[in-house]
């Protein structure tokens, strides 16, 4: 039987070889071209980059205001916890005094389960056991019974303090975890915005930076502008004067001055200089006075922006405000129609 062999293919030569090579190269080039189209990232125009950066900064500021609010809550929780610890220490002293009054023998029994004079070491079963054993005192002596009753009340108050302190500690831990998340959010938004700006061509970046510098008038011009401000009261005039003095200082999220500010930190510091205490965040400051219609704005009024009340400035007249815009942009003068207006308040 004859063996079946596959005919040997003869290599292409001459024009046939050149044609095959040309087709192969064309196919490879086409594949590469389509592959590039499939994976290419769209190039944003400078205007689109600016819009995206502004959006990122606005989102960062929203997160900053949440951070500021949570930080204030954490401070309040810490103060409450200190108060509870102080009260627990006083109650422990009173309890020790009452214990001594019950007599040396009873005191010796009670001391076996004594309460540690700090909130960290709470009640053991010792005091209750002692009181059970001391019940005979109530039957034996009315005065002793009164003392036992007082001790019972003090024990109850200490148990209540323990529960309250545990809740406060839990709240504080949750607030600290929120602070960490909010801080991360702010930092990520800022990093993304700065990375986008760094990719702009040099002329466009210079143009953006010039726009972002805003109006920071020379000192002489600031004095003249302050002198022309007609505020509804002396407190508002002092707040406006402070805002003028802060022109050119950097934006730093979470800052309340004197070297740097975020938006609500600037307005808080301005009114603090005038003797009025404002809350820390935009969404609490908007409830810190009389609401004012846009057509009735006067120097010193606080003006708020965006639907989430995430930005605030201090009105200085002529449709302008002084505000701390965002990272990379110093405290500056800007028109209030630069952002979506959300409301205004006259602090009181």
Image (cartoon, rainbow, N blue to C red):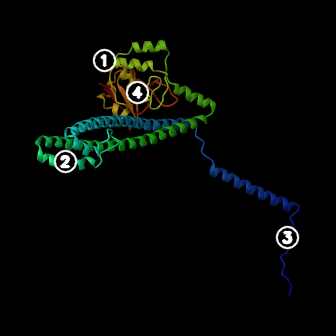
How much space separates mark 4 and mark 1, taking CA atoms? 18 Å
| Disc 2 secondary structure class | loop
Disc 2 vs disc 4: which is toward the camera?
2
Task: Please provide percent x and percent y for residue 220.
Answer: 48, 12
Please name which of the two marks, 1 or 2, marks the residue nearer to the observer.
2
Real-space Cα distance between discs 3 and 2? Answer: 112 Å
Q: Earlier in the sequence, mark 2 or mark 4?
A: 2
Residue 336 visible in the picture: no
The answer to whether the residue labelled 1 contacts the one labelled 2, judged by CB atoms less than 8 Å apart, is: no
Q: Residues within 10 Å of mark 2 (few under 14, many from 20)?
A: some
**Between 155 and 82, which is closer to the camera in this rendering?**
155
Residue at numbered disc 4: 313
Quick one: which residue is furthest to the front in this view? 105
Q: Residue at x 28, y 43 (%)?
A: 111
Position of 343 with respect to 191 (left or right) is left
Task: Kindly identify which residue carries mark 2.
Answer: 134
Query: Which numbered disc flags the more N-terminal residue, 1 or 2?
Result: 2
Measure how far apart labels 2 and 4 are at the Cα level.
Answer: 67 Å
Tell me the crowding category of disc 4: few under 14, some 14 to 19, or many 20 or more residues within 10 angstroms, Cα based.
Answer: many
Q: Which residue has dot 3 on it?
A: 9
C-alpha span from label 3 to label 1 = 101 Å
Give the SS element for disc 3.
Answer: loop
Disc 1 designates what residue? 233
């Amino acid at each position: 039987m004859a063996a079946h062999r596959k005919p040997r293919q003869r290599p292409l030569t001459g024009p046939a070889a050149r044609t095959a090579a040309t087709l192969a190269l064309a196919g490879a080039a086409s594949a590469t071209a389509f592959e590039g189209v499939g994976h290419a990232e769209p190039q944003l125009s400078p205007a689109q980059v600016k819009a995206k950066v502004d959006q990122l900064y606005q989102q960062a500021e929203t997160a900053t205001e949440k951070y500021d609010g949570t930080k204030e809550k954490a401070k309040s929780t810490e103060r409450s916890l200190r108060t509870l610890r102080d009260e627990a220490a006083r109650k422990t002293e009173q309890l020790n005094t009452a214990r001594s009054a019950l007599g040396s023998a009873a005191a010796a029994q009670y001391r076996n389960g004594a309460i540690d004079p700090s909130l960290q070491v709470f009640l053991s079963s010792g005091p209750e056991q002692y009181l059970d054993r001391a019940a005979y005192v109530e039957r034996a002596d009315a005065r002793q019974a009164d003392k036992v009753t007082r001790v019972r009340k003090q024990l109850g108050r200490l148990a209540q303090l323990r529960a309250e302190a545990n809740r406060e500690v839990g709240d504080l831990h949750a607030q600290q975890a929120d602070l960490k998340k909010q801080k991360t959010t702010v930092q990520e938004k800022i990093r993304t915005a700065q990375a986008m700006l760094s990719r702009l061509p040099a002329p466009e970046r210079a143009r953006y930076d010039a726009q972002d510098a805003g109006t920071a008038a020379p000192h002489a011009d600031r004095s003249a502008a302050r002198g022309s401000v007609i505020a509804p009261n002396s407190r508002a005039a002092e707040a406006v004067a402070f805002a003028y003095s802060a022109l050119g200082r950097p934006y730093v999220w979470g800052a309340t001055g004197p070297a740097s500010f975020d938006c609500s930190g600037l307005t808080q510091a301005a009114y603090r200089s005038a003797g009025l205490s404002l809350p820390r965040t935009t969404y609490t400051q908007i409830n810190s006075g009389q609401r004012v219609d846009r057509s009735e704005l006067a120097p010193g009024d606080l003006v708020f922006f965006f639907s989430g009340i995430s930005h605030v400035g201090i009105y200085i007249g002529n449709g302008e405000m002084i505000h701390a815009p965002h990272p990379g942009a110093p405290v500056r003068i800007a028109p209030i129609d630069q952002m979506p207006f959300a409301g205004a308040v006259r602090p009181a």
